[in-house]
């Protein structure tokens, strides 16, 4: 019955003079994500029509749900601009939706073709009357209907649809520049990366590995998470930078008083992240921190940790509760990977009583107990980069190597 899909962009009123750039970026992503499916495209100034060509609409919508910057979809049926044909097609659509159960409805008409002799206000009651003469289970309710039939009269025919399917929303990924996501392996950071992409920020990922202090499987978790996130990225691919952190990690554990281990570790990670961020032309650091969730995420802790960097820090989950984050992780398909029982740098060797209001002066003093600058330089120099695609599965665990021993800067 449905031969095309109507796509609406996000709120164009917010784009001002950048509307054309926004639409061009969104249209490019639409074409890219639907590649390999035999569909047609009709790009208009404020919307897109996808000709389904007998493809399953759900398959097309699943692909489009990876495109940020789209507001909603509607399945469209088209017929000639004839009141009887419109009513007949509308009745088929309503019967499919209601299964002949008692239902209230109304007709809303938009006359895009101003040359058509009937106005929108005249078309709606005519169509409703023809439907009511046949469908005894229907009654009109213009204020609070259970169903709204939309009729758009255009130059090339009448377009009929009922309801809207919510799209991803946000802005087309890449329109907001590029950020470096600090990706642990837990639930929060991949959700933060997804939300950043949803707001138009392209991402690269940064993962700190501490093998053999942490297992190689924790690195695999990070790789698998990136492959899921790549569904939402341009060309279905994202880079991950894997930082060898074991030397610095060991020095922190050996030399820093236990309550300050996490504080100092995070300060070191931010220093490294800023260097790698700038080397890769990123505009910000993104992480999954949420206020008060753990000791290193109190406002006092975040302030103390932030002081080591001049980079812009974006925290998409700053005011989210855990249940909200978990719901998004479930929706985007990362939660099962994150729940694998392999600890990363941020969860292994956790102190029993971490400081929640760290002193900046004490943190700076404890760092004098470490000769950390050469270790940071070593970590940066030995960072390995993988280009991961959502359609391929890169298996590090089957290689039988430590990350620091053998990965090359190859595309996978």
Image (cartoon, rainbow, N blue to C red):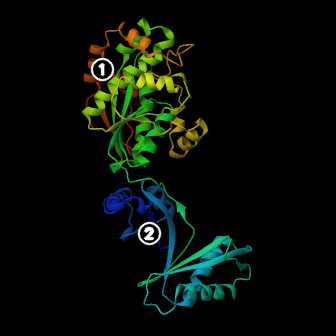
Which of the two labelled residues, at mark 2 and mark 1, occupies the earlier sequence position? 2
Residue 308 spot, x, y in % from top left: 36, 22
Above or below residue 395? Residue 58 is below
Q: Secondary structure at mark 1?
A: helix
**Looking at this view, is 192 or 242 the one in front?**
192
Q: Within 10 Å of the Cα at label 2, are there few (<14), some (14-19), or many (20+) other Cα atoms?
A: many
Q: Within 10 Å of the Cα at label 1, are there few (<14), some (14-19), or many (20+) other Cα atoms?
A: many
Above or below residue 244? Residue 86 is below
Asked whether disc 2 touches disc 1, contact meaning CB atoms under 8 Å apart, the reply is no
In the image, which disc is placed on residue 71?
none
Q: Report the number of discs.
A: 2
Location of the C terminus by quadrant is top left
Residue located 48% across and 56% down the image: 62
Residue 270 spot, x, y in % from top left: 37, 25
Q: Secondary structure at mark 2?
A: loop
Residue located 46% across and 69% down the image: 6
Q: CA distance from mark 2 to mark 1?
A: 50 Å
Residue located 70% across and 75% down the image: 104
Residue 395 spot, x, y in % from top left: 39, 32
In the image, which disc is placed on residue 52?
2
Q: Is residue 350 left or right of residue 390?
A: right
- Any part of residue 42 in sight: yes
- Any part of residue 343 in sight: no
Name the residue tied to disc 1: 379
């Amino acid at each position: 019955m449905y031969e095309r899909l109507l796509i609406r962009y996000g709120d164009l009123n917010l784009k001002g003079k950048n509307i054309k750039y926004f639409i061009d970026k969104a249209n490019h992503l639409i074409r890219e994500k639907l590649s390999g499916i035999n569909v047609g495209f009709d790009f208009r100034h404020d919307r897109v029509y996808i000709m389904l060509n007998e493809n399953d609409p759900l398959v097309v919508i699943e692909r489009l749900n990876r495109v940020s910057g789209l507001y909603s979809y509607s399945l469209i049926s088209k017929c000639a601009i004839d009141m009887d044909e419109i009513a007949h097609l509308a009745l088929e659509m309503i019967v499919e939706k209601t299964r002949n159960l008692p239902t209230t409805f109304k007709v809303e008409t938009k006359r895009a073709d101003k040359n058509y002799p009937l106005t929108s206000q005249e078309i709606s009651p005519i169509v409703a009357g023809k439907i009511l003469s046949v469908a005894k289970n229907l009654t009109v309710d213009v204020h609070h209907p259970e169903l709204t039939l939309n009729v758009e009269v255009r130059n090339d025919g009448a377009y009929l649809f009922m309801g809207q399917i919510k799209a991803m929303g946000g802005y087309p990924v890449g329109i907001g520049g590029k950020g470096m996501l600090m990706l642990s392996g837990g639930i929060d950071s991949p959700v933060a990366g997804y939300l950043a992409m949803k707001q138009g920020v392209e991402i690269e990922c940064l993962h700190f590995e501490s093998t053999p202090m942490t297992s190689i499987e924790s690195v695999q978790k990070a790789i698998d998470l990136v492959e899921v996130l790549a569904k939402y990225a341009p060309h279905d691919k994202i880079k991950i930078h894997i930082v060898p952190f074991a030397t610095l990690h060991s020095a922190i554990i050996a030399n820093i008083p236990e309550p300050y281990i996490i504080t100092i570790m995070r300060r070191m990670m931010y220093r490294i992240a800023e260097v790698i961020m700038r080397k890769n032309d990123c505009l910000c650091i993104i992480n999954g921190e949420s206020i008060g969730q753990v000791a290193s995420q109190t406002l006092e802790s975040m302030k103390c940790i932030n002081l080591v960097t001049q980079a812009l820090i974006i925290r998409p989950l700053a005011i989210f509760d855990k249940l909200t984050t978990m719901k998004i992780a479930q929706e985007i398909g990362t939660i099962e990977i994150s729940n694998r029982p392999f600890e990363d740098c941020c969860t292994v060797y956790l102190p029993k009583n971490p400081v929640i209001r760290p002193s900046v002066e004490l943190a700076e003093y404890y760092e004098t107990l470490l000769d950390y600058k050469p270790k940071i330089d070593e970590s940066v120099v030995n960072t390995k980069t993988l280009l991961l695609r959502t359609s391929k599965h890169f298996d590090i665990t089957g290689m039988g190597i430590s990350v620091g021993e053998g990965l090359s800067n190859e595309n996978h």
